[in-house]
């Protein structure tokens, strides 16, 4: 087997904190410690490999071509998160300057002061909104399914919901007692979720009022303990976990929410999805497993039903693939969840990325040894 990788010095050698693909799959955006956002095109190469044997392929053959499109420089500090809106008409970025910037593709060339790459740019993006409300660094952002709202997470211990049309925050969640490091918006339009370094994950319901504005409930459920047996068990790592992010994620069909930074004791296991079937959990009361918790929709306000993991390092981010797949035709794998299709998701730990699907409890693959620093984000 020939393994091909493409390494790009995306942000002048500085850390990349976030990556996201547009819904059409033609662009992706990166953001990082150099206070910039960069946009790239990605195209599949003409597939002429069917008639070419492995021995005839060269090391320069890559399945995709990547090209630099634009550099966006309006932030004054590191950019921690970048996300395309569902339709791809907006790109949102936010970071240590506590500012959310909404960008749109422009027909007019805009020269950005301080940009070293303007002569190479093939697209121009304009900052249409610069939104302020948080008073400290913003760590995560997620769009509503309609693309008219988004939610942000900040180390000011709050999460805020913003209206694109109104250009302001329309709701503030202030139930956490420490940094809010992850937010997720339910694709079915019923919940938003927040995850904090106070060792909890909170679920909120919302609906559209008669005046058309979104109305959010008080916290519907705050998950911090697993009630199993006689002793409650903490679900998540405390604030000493060395990570900026705890990026949780809903599946594209809304059937599941997976939360990172989980810890599981062997004697409190619900369903163990171990990475190594030959090295399953023992039953020592003291043994702790790094994991991510799976909350199905029907018990999202009650408890998780399983964890995925038993990783060597804590998990920090989860992202789902938006493509839906058919079940693999095999008699040897019993579907882990009773779904008429198969979904894929990725879990990033501090040193590796694991790819899973909903048809089996073991990871499809594990990727490690490719990063110079801890992993911070995922995209699909």
Image (tube, rainbow, N blue to C red):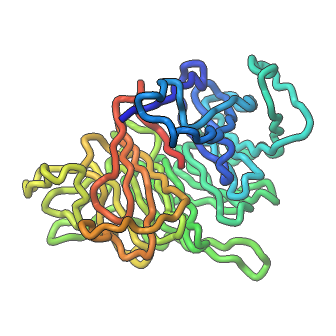
Using residue 112 as the reference point, say whether residue 293 is left or right of it.
left
Query: Which image quadrant is residue 373 in?
Result: top left
Q: Nearer the viewer, residue 281 or 267?
A: 281
* Vertical side of 10 occupied by 290: above or below: below
Q: Residue at x 74, y 17 (%)?
A: 116
Q: Quadrant of the N terminus?
A: top left
Query: Which image quadrant is residue 109 in?
Result: top right
Using residue 143 as the reference point, say whether residue 257 is left or right of it.
left
Where's residue 51, x and y in %?
51, 40
* Vertical side of 90 occupied by 58: above or below: above
Q: Residue at x 13, y 61 (%)?
A: 267
Using residue 378 as the reference point, say whether residue 74 is left or right of it.
right
Q: Nearer the viewer, residue 211 or 189?
A: 189
Q: Residue at x 66, y 54 (%)?
A: 23
Where's residue 183, x and y in %?
53, 55
User: Can residue 72 be seen?
Assistant: no
* Vertical side of 183 occupied by 372: above or below: above
User: Can residue 369 be seen?
Assistant: yes
Q: Residue at x 51, y 70 (%)?
A: 254
Where's residue 174, x and y in %?
54, 58
């Amino acid at each position: 087997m020939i393994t091909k990788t493409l390494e790009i010095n995306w942000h002048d050698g500085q850390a990349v904190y976030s990556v996201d693909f547009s819904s059409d799959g033609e662009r992706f955006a990166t953001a990082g410690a150099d206070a910039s956002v960069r946009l790239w095109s990605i195209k599949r190469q003409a597939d002429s490999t069917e008639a070419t044997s492995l021995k005839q392929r060269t090391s320069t053959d890559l399945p995709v071509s990547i090209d630099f499109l634009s550099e966006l420089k309006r932030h004054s500090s590191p950019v921690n998160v970048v996300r395309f809106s569902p339709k791809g008409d907006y790109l949102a970025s936010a970071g240590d300057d506590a500012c959310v910037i909404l960008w749109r593709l422009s027909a007019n060339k805009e020269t950005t002061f301080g940009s070293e790459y303007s002569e190479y740019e093939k697209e121009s993006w304009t900052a249409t909104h610069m939104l302020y409300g948080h008073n400290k660094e913003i760590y995560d952002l997620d769009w509503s399914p309609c693309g008219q709202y988004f939610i942000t997470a900040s180390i000011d211990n709050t999460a805020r919901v913003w209206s694109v049309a109104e250009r302001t925050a329309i709701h503030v969640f202030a139930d956490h007692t420490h940094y809010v490091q992850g937010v997720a918006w339910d694709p079915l339009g019923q919940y938003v979720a927040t995850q904090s370094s106070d060792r909890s994950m909170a679920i909120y319901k919302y609906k559209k009022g008669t005046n058309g504005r979104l109305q959010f409930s008080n916290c519907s459920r705050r998950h911090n303990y697993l009630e199993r047996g006689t002793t409650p068990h903490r679900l998540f790592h405390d604030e000493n976990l060395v990570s900026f992010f705890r990026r949780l994620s809903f599946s594209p069909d809304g059937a599941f929410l997976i939360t990172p930074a989980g810890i599981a004791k062997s004697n409190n296991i619900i369903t163990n999805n171990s990475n190594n079937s030959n090295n399953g959990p023992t039953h020592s009361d003291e043994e702790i497993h790094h994991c991510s918790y799976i909350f199905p929709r029907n018990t999202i306000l009650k408890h998780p039903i399983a964890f995925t993991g038993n990783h060597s390092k804590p998990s920090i981010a989860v992202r789902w693939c938006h493509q839906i797949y058919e079940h693999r035709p095999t008699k040897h794998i019993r579907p882990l969840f009773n779904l008429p299709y198969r979904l894929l998701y990725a879990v990033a730990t501090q040193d590796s990325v694991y790819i899973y699907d909903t048809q089996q409890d073991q990871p499809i693959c594990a990727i490690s040894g490719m990063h110079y620093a801890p992993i911070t984000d995922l995209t699909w």
